[in-house]
Amino acid sequence: MGAPGNPHDPVASPGNPRLETRHMYFDRFDICEAWYLWLCDNHGGQWSREYKRLSKMTRYFRPSPMLSVETLTDNGRAIFDALEAR
């Protein structure tokens, strides 16, 4: 992650003040949850690269039926927001 104000770092983006104070750390579960939700919302259809990745994730990750952006941990939400900023 870059320094605050770094224009190449989506988490520290000056245009997104909500993300400026968020710091991500490595947690496999948070990463899987955030990526799963992001891929569900942003895949480009059955033949897209994102859909292929989502399908592969189901081999090792079974999300809770209650999983949503609102149920993510703070770290998971920071990861999800960084994906959204891409």
Image (tube, grey):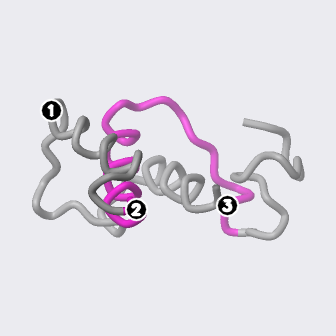
Which of the image's four quarters has the C terminus?
A: bottom right
Q: Residue sitting at 30 percent across and 43 percent down?
A: 52
Q: Say whether marks 2 and 1 touch (CB < 8 Å).
A: no
Q: Is residue 34 magenta?
A: yes
Classify 10 Å Cα crowding around label 3: few (below 14), some (14-19), many (20 and above). some
Q: Say whether marks 3 and 1 touch (CB < 8 Å).
A: no
Q: Residue 32 at what x, y percent from top left?
A: 33, 40
Classify 10 Å Cα crowding around label 1: few (below 14), some (14-19), many (20 and above). few
Above/below status of 56 relative to 14: above
Residue at disc 3, secondary structure: helix
Q: Is residue 37 magenta?
A: yes
Q: Which residue is mark 3?
A: 19
Magenta stretch bounds:
18-44
Above/below status of 13 relative to 3: below
Residue at disc 1, secondary structure: loop
Q: Which residue is mark 2?
A: 44
Q: Residue 36 at what x, y percent from top left?
A: 32, 50
> Which numbered disc, 2 or 1, marks the residue closer to the eye?
2
Q: Say whether marks 3 and 2 touch (CB < 8 Å).
A: no
Above/below status of 40 relative to 34: below
Of 43 and 32, which appears nearest the observer? Answer: 43
Residue at disc 2, secondary structure: loop
Question: What type is the residue that disc 2 sits on?
Answer: Gly
Q: CA distance from mark 3 to mark 2?
A: 26 Å
| Relative side of 20 to 67, left or right | right
Mark before the other along the chain sequence, 3 or 1? 3
Mark before the other along the chain sequence, 3 or 2? 3
> Which numbered disc, 3 or 2, marks the residue closer to the eye?
2
Mark sitting on residue 59? 1
